[in-house]
Image (cartoon, grey):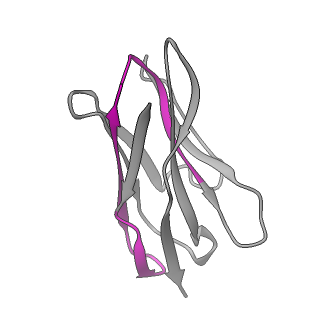
Amino acid sequence: QVQLVESGGGLVQAGESLRLSCAASGRIRSMKFMGWHRQAPGKQRELVARITSGGAINYADSVKGRFTISRDNAKNLVYLQMNSLKPEDTAVYYCNAQYYGDGNDYWGQGTQVTVSS
């Protein structure tokens, strides 16, 4: 089993920045991908950004140019740098990961990001 723990959420004003971190621990095999999803009240969970083992990255159109995903393989960490935050970015942000040789889809407990106008 793998545990994912997010940190870095909080309350900011529009235009400000936050950096989220996700730390993986447990029986970690070779990472297939790690990424971030978010869920706003009354809305479906959506993919924000994902990075694969090969370094391929994809972003939701709504965050392109503002958010950057990165990873530290040695420390089993993935980050989400969020700049120019908007009120519509307000959501619970979840870390998500899959590993080769492990059929599970792992999720963190979520961290709240609130952006005030």
Q: Quarter of the image for the N terminus: give it.
A: top left
Asked which quadrant contains residue 88, the reply is: bottom right
Would residue 88 be found to the left or right of residue 4 on screen? right
Q: Which residue is situated farthest in the left direction here?
A: 74
In the foreground, 80 or 6: 6
Residue 110, position in %: x, y? 50, 59
Where are the magenta residues, as a range? Answer: 8-37
**Residue nearest the observer in this picture, 79 or 109:** 109
Q: Residue at x 29, y 33 (%)?
A: 76
Q: Please report the residue visible at 27 percent of the width from the left and 28 percent of the height from the top.
A: 73
**Is 34 drawn above or below residue 112 in the view shown?**
above
Instruction: Identify which residue is drawn at 50% across, 11% down.
Output: 101
Return the x and y of residue 42 as percentages of the image width and height.
78, 71
Q: Is residue 71 left or right of residue 108?
A: left
**Magenta span includes 24:** yes
Q: Is residue 29 above or below residue 59?
A: above
Specify the farthest residue to the front: 1
The majority secondary structure of the magenta stretch comes to strand
Residue 57 x %, y %: 50, 31
Q: Quadrant of residue 70?
A: top left
Q: Quadrant of the C terminus?
A: bottom right
* Residue 59 spot, x, y in % from top left: 58, 42
Between residue 27 and residue 73, name the one nearer to us.
27
Q: Is residue 54 shown above or below 91?
A: above
